[in-house]
């Protein structure tokens, strides 16, 4: 009898010890839920879209590096300018005919915020194993202070025959460009043509 009594007492004590623990385990989900509900109003929901908007305005244009045509090359050149990648922009010029020393080239764009370009029809010819093009362009340049200036003119480009080139290979490159201010609107500023290259 005393053994049976001892077993029953042990089971009763165990049940009493487990009951509060079970009750405690049931309460935290309610407390966590309450905490989550009270935390929701404190979230700065209005600030998130503003932060995203400011990031979008600072996003540079998608990277473009294409030398397959005169137009693609000049687009790539101004893409580099718009992305502030001045070394890449400089690399589109023929290695044996840079426009000026690189530090001066980079300084020339320090106040430029963005550049848009429109194209006319390229004039091409081949000579001595190379192909040459003249490409009419209009440029709309916006300065960091908001000032907009329109230019027009022509770029000359060259590609030595890829089949006979050695190493290092020289892709299509800008030989030079002549731009001057235009009094016409940007959309009307593309020259009708350029002199033969």
Image (tube, grey):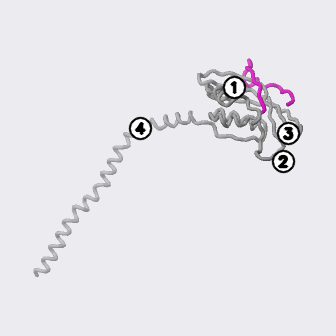
Badge 3 density bin: few <14, some 14–19, many ≥20, Cα 10 Å: some
- Which residue is denoted by mark 2 in the rendering? 163
Image spot of residue 148 (x, y percent): 65, 22
The image's mark for residue 111 is none
- Which residue is denoted by mark 4 in the rendering? 44
Badge 2 density bin: few <14, some 14–19, many ≥20, Cα 10 Å: few
Badge 1 density bin: few <14, some 14–19, many ≥20, Cα 10 Å: many
Q: Give the range drawn in magenta.
A: 175-197
Residue 22: quarter of image: bottom left
- Which of pointers 1 and 3 lies earlier in the amino acid sequence? 3
- Which of pointers 4 and 2 lies earlier in the amino acid sequence? 4
* In-front residue for pair 124/176: 176
- Which of pointers 2 and 1 lies earlier in the amino acid sequence? 1
- Which residue is denoted by mark 1 in the rendering? 140
Considering only vertical position in the picture, is 179 above or below 34?
above
The image's mark for residue 130 is 3
SS of the residue under disc 1: strand
Label pair 4/1, CB-CB below 8 angstroms: no
Residue in view at x 63 percent, y 35 percent: 85
Task: Quadrant for the N terminus, please.
Answer: bottom left
- Which of pointers 4 and 1 lies earlier in the amino acid sequence? 4
Image spot of residue 13 (x, y percent): 17, 69
Disc 4 vs disc 2: which is toward the camera? 2
**Left or right of 128, for residue 22:** left
Residue 103: quarter of image: top right
Magenta-drawn stretch contains 10: no
Task: Quadrant for the C terminus, please.
Answer: top right
Residue in view at x 85 percent, y 38 percent: 131
- Which of pointers 2 and 3 lies earlier in the amino acid sequence? 3
């Amino acid at each position: 009898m005393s053994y049976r009594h001892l077993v029953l007492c042990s089971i009763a004590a165990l049940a009493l010890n487990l009951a509060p623990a079970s009750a405690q385990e049931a309460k935290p989900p309610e407390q966590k839920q309450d905490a989550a509900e009270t935390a929701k109003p404190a979230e700065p929901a209005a600030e998130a879209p503003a932060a995203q908007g400011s990031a979008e305005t600072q996003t540079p244009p998608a990277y473009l590096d294409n030398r397959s045509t005169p137009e693609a090359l000049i687009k790539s050149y101004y893409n580099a300018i718009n992305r502030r990648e001045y070394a890449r922009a400089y690399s589109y010029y023929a290695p044996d005919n840079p426009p000026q020393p690189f530090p001066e080239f980079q300084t020339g764009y320090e106040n430029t915020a963005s550049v848009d370009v429109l194209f006319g029809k390229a004039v091409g010819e081949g000579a001595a194993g190379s192909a040459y093009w003249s490409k009419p362009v209009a440029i709309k340049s916006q300065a960091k202070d908001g000032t907009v200036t329109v230019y027009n003119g022509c770029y000359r480009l060259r590609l030595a025959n890829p089949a006979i080139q050695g190493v290092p290979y020289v892709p299509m490159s800008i030989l030079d460009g002549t731009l001057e201010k235009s009094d016409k609107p940007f959309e009307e500023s593309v020259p009708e043509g350029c002199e033969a290259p």
